[in-house]
Image (spheres, rainbow, N blue to C red):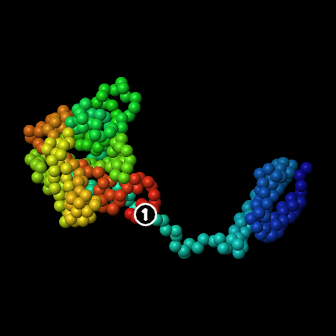
């Protein structure tokens, strides 16, 4: 049964009046939410029930007018709801307990501490920068190496007694591999020298920083994991004088212009002739102290002219490495040892302890 037009108008007018009156009394977020659910709820909202009762029973010719009034009522409810939301949001700041929690955007923010390089990283970067200024590029390679690149190509043939001095950590379960293909943790960064020569004809000037591994017992000056910086220079006419001049310049750049260097004969399988390099003690200026064992000198690194046998391995892939036409030198030093000298550190384990009290000294 349909309602007369006057009755429908009166019904919607009463509902609109009720909406305005109820919305004007909303004073909290909870009241606003209840108002929304009461009128716009999808299951039990009053507008849903009104739509079902009026539109379902209205005659076809009346549905248009009722639909227009219904839409006007719904628009009114939504507008009043939006107004109430804005009003209640503003009133929240009047609550003193919430006002105390406001964020003052004019206050300076929390300043995050700026990190600093680890002393090993800093020392390694200093060394690389010194040789970069001399025209050396940086070479990198894998830490898990084959026996061939770590030993054989560096003139450590199988059974060579020099292999025993490096206490190698070998990857297990490789009995089926050929001996030269078996994997190990590299004991020096020298394999990068061979990998570079295989990929690049001379001239070559590279410096190689990196982590190496040896089965050493940990003590005040030894660690099974440590870092090296090695260098390789190959070209026509390279002599031992070039090697001495390069390393003397590097030590002066690292420790100061007053530092002196001297070279003593030594042995390394991949260089011939080979030498140990000593610098004048930076603690007593060569006068003799406990740290230099009263000698006035500290042994710091090893070096030498590249052995022709090493060039022969490189020549298998790069014929330009003919020892009759080119020559070169190589050197290597332990980063931890240099860092301990520069910063007066007596226990190598402090580098790896992660103790912030120690590391903050370098910030």
- Is 98 rendered above or below residue 341? below
- Closer to us: 281 or 312: 281
Work out whether residue 205 can be spotted.
no
Q: Quadrant of the C terminus?
A: bottom left
- Closer to us: 221 or 312: 221
- Is 337 rendered above or below residue 180? below
For disc 1, the marked residue is 360
Q: Would you say 253 lies left or right of 177 here?
A: left
Work out whether residue 103 can be spotted.
yes
- Residue 337's spot in the image, x, y percent? 30, 54
Q: Would you say 77 lies left or right of 277 here?
A: right
- Residue 261's spot in the image, x, y percent? 17, 58
Determine the residue located farthest toward the right in the rendered image.
1
Q: How many marks?
A: 1
- Residue 333's spot in the image, x, y percent? 26, 51
**Res 10 quadrant in image:** bottom right
For image coordinates 18% across by 43% down, the residue present is 267
- Residue 96's spot in the image, x, y percent? 71, 75
**Is the residue marked by circle 1 packed among few (<14), some (14-19), or many (20+) residues within 10 Å?**
few
- Closer to us: 123 or 214: 214
Q: Would you say 187 lies left or right of 361 here?
A: left
**Res 16 quadrant in image:** bottom right
SS label for mark 1: helix
């Amino acid at each position: 049964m349909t309602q007369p037009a006057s009755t429908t108008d009166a019904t919607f007018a009463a509902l609109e009046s009720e909406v305005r009156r109820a919305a004007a009394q909303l004073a909290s977020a909870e009241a606003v939410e209840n108002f929304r659910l009461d009128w716009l709820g999808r299951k039990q909202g009053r507008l849903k029930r009104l739509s079902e009762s009026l539109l379902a029973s209205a005659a076809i010719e009346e549905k248009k007018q009722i639909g227009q009034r219904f839409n006007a009522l719904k628009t009114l409810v939504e507008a009043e709801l939006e107004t109430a939301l804005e009003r209640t949001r503003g009133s929240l700041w009047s609550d003193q307990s919430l006002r105390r929690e406001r964020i003052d955007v004019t206050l300076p923010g929390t300043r995050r501490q700026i990190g600093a390089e680890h002393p090993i990283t800093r020392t390694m970067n200093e060394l690389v920068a010194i040789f970069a200024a001399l025209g050396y590029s940086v070479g990198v390679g894998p830490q898990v190496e084959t026996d061939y690149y770590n030993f054989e190509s560096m003139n450590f043939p199988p059974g060579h007694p020099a292999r025993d001095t490096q206490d190698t950590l070998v990857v297990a379960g490789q009995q089926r591999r050929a001996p030269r293909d078996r994997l190990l943790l590299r004991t020096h960064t020298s394999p990068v020298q061979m990998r570079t020569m295989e990929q690049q004809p001379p001239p070559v000037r590279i410096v190689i920083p990196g982590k190496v591994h040896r089965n050493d017992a940990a003590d005040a000056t030894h660690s099974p994991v440590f870092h090296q910086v090695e260098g390789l220079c190959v070209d026509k006419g390279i002599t031992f004088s070039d090697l001495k001049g390069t390393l003397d310049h590097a030590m002066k750049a690292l420790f100061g212009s007053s530092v002196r260097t001297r070279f003593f004969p030594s042995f390394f399988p991949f260089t011939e002739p080979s030498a140990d390099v000593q610098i004048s003690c930076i603690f007593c200026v060569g006068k003799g102290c406990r740290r230099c064992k009263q000698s006035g000198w500290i042994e710091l690194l090893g070096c030498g002219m590249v052995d022709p046998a090493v060039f022969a391995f490189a020549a298998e892939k790069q014929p330009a490495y003919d020892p009759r036409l080119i020559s070169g030198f190589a050197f290597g030093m332990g980063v931890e040892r240099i860092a301990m000298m520069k910063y007066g550190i007596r226990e190598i384990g402090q580098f790896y302890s992660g103790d912030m009290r120690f590391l903050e000294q370098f910030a």
